[in-house]
Amino acid sequence: MKQVFSRPLNLKDVQTHFCPGCQHGAIHRLVAEALHDLGIRDRTIGIASVGCSVFLYSYFDIDVVESPHGRAPAVATGAKRARPDRIVFTYQGDGDLAAIGTSEIIHAANRGEDITVIFVNNTTYGMTGGQMAPTTMPGQKTSTSPAGRDIKNDGAPFKMAELLSNLGGVAYSARVAVNSPKNVLQAKKMINTAFRYQVEGRGFSFIEALSICPTNWGMKPLQANQRLTEEMIPYFPLGVYKNTANL
Amino acid sequence: MPHITIDQERCKGCGLCTIACPKKLVSMSESPNSLGFYVAVFSGPEQCTGCAMCAEMCPDVAIAVFKERTP
Amino acid sequence: MSEKLFVKGNEAVAMAALEAGVRCYFGYPITPQSDIPEYLSHALPKAGGTFIQVESEIGAINMVLGASAAGVRAMTSSSGPGISLKQEGISYMAGSELPGVIVDIMRQGPGLGGIDASQADYWQATRGGGHGGYRIIVLAPASVQEMYDLTMLAFDLSDIYRMPAMVLADSVIGQMKESIVANPRPMVELPAKEWAVRGRQEGQAQNVVKSLKLGDGEMEAFHWSMHARYKELAEKESRWEELYTEDAELIVTAFGSTARISRTAVAMAREAGLKVGLLRPITLFPFPAHVYLALSQRCKLFLDIELSTGQMIDDVRLSVARDADVAFYGRPPGAGSLPTPEEIFQQIRKVYP
């Protein structure tokens, strides 16, 4: 008997604090698999951000720097410019990247920093209890949009993969999901490609990964997964938005 | 023959594996684990092909998949 | 071989940073310190380092955090409004025990304020500035030579004590030109940065640079350890300048540009037969409290001169003997408010016992 599926080496064998069904765990695993497959885990530095993914260092067995809320792309820029031979990636949520951190992500992307950004979009602020996020969908009820997001008051949700693909410095921008086995395998390929861009020195790479947040959506995991499939994906279409080197 | 193992102490009972398996060989337990989660259980050793789709879906990396060595 | 040069205060800071081996500069233009990024924009890449004019002062401090976490010497520079923006990042650096140099060339505030010299950011510099209850090393040059020497010192102290260090000056010293000797980097024993993130190899322990401390007792222990470190700093690294204090009946105390002006006023006072001395703190944190205490055993009157309505005076009052008096003369910062030596001499005459 051969084991054909196991935990990647750089993902610690610990119970995570993520809620049942939270897809951070799956996305963490895909990133860990990419680091392993590309043989880069021993020269990778992760930049943790603020949100449910704050404990990145507890799960990835790599060196990690904790960044203030939203500033991870700037911290990553500092680390990568200081050590250009290392692989540097950030892992951020909706509030971190698309609210407080908009300046830092736009400029790091525009400068074409040789880093990889993993952006997890679950249309809410998880860690702080389900408030409205820049990615909350029109009509979606959250703890700070009790009547549902009103575009007139709050604007429309950001589509980050598309937005960043318009910047010259961005080499790869893609949106993935882990809601079905087919999409998990696609996501695995695209995350691998994103890191390949950095390994081959081809410029800034960006992955927007859709995820469910059962607790703050007030749904059971399978129900939440259905919402992702039926409501989120049509609004945030999966696919590759930029691929300058055609990898 | 191919089969999976589910780590009862890692599983949080989210149920995402149950929709991943093309043969519906994973279901949820009737009794909770030590943390109170109603964990996933594997019910079909004969029909499992070792496709690992359940493991790919699992956010807690709780599933290990085993297959025969191909000659 | 030490070169003799005639340079601006801000340029001296940039030159010293290069000599100290700075690898990364991240900054944003703001009057009155833009000479620093301008100089480094051409000199630092030539020296093989990285220069980025960044999107904001917030971006800059976070890049310093990242580069420092990766084990290299990094710096940023700004003035009041930008230093306000950096407070979060500085707090994170303090909490993560990261070295890094922040240069603050003070201008008038609050708000957009103005571009004239100020000393009204003394509190911002020495009282943490950001949240959480930390201190940073603060060095206050009073000449272009000190802008050079203290910048190099800031890098060394920052690395040795694993905390951010600030060089605090104002637009007078930043913009003035004086002759300096461009000394080579001093030979100092520096600790190896074993804590830095480097890409963990097989068999190595994971290095994590963070300030989140949730464990039972963890944060309390950290604060006590910082407290002990600040005490060590006070014992080993306090720096100050004394002039004519041995027999002084009145000691004028000031830092930075007001100390320069006071030096002339004190000379005028001595000319006029008054026994006046000058005590100039060079480290504002650690504040040389023990020197004030010692001098105030004999001299019972101090005159604190500041370009503000009085901030350093709090530290002076806290440091002198209980029966010593501290008088104050200050000019809030703004166009036209830089005091003359004659003005300060008048104040000396007024309060002299």
Image (spheres, coloured by chain):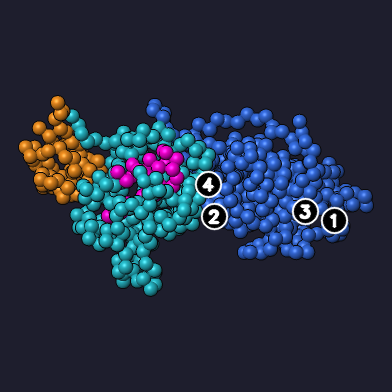
- As drawn, C323 above or below A37: below
What color does chain A have in the rendering? Answer: cyan
Please report the residue visible at 39 percent of the width from the left and 26 percent of the height from the top: C203
Instruction: Name the chain letter of the residue that bears numbered label 3.
Output: C
Q: Position of residue C164 (x, y in %)?
A: 58, 44
- Characterize the local packing of mark 4: few (<14), some (14-19) or many (20 or more) Cα atoms within 10 angstroms: many
Indicate the secondary structure of the residue bearing disc 3: helix
Gap between marks 2 and 4, in whole Å?
11 Å
Instruction: Give neighbour class at mark 2: few <14, some 14-19, many 20+ (Cα, 10 Å).
Output: some
Label 1 and label 4: CA atoms lie apart by 42 Å
Colour assigned to chain C in the rendering is: blue
Question: On the same chain: label 2 and label 1?
Answer: yes
In this rendered view, identify the residue nearer to me: C134 or A71. Answer: A71
Residue at (75% x, 61% y) in the render: C331
Q: Cα distance, mark 2 to mark 3?
A: 34 Å
Question: Which quadrant of the figure contains the C terminus of chain C?
Answer: bottom right
- Residues at marks 2 and 1, CA–CA distance in whole angstroms: 41 Å
Kindly identify which chain the residue marked by label 2 belongs to: C
Magenta part of the chain: A189-213
Residue behind mark 1 = C341
Q: Which residue is mark 2?
A: C55
Q: Amino acid at mark 1?
A: Pro
Q: Quadrant of the N terminus of chain C?
A: top right
Q: Chain drawn orange, letter?
A: B
Amino acid at pointer 3: Thr
Residue where numbered disc 4 is placed = C63
Q: Distance from label 3 to label 4 (Cα)?
A: 33 Å
What is the quadrant of residue A126 in the picture? bottom left
N-terminal-most mark, 1 or 4 = 4
Q: On the rendered structure, is C3 left or right of C285? A: right
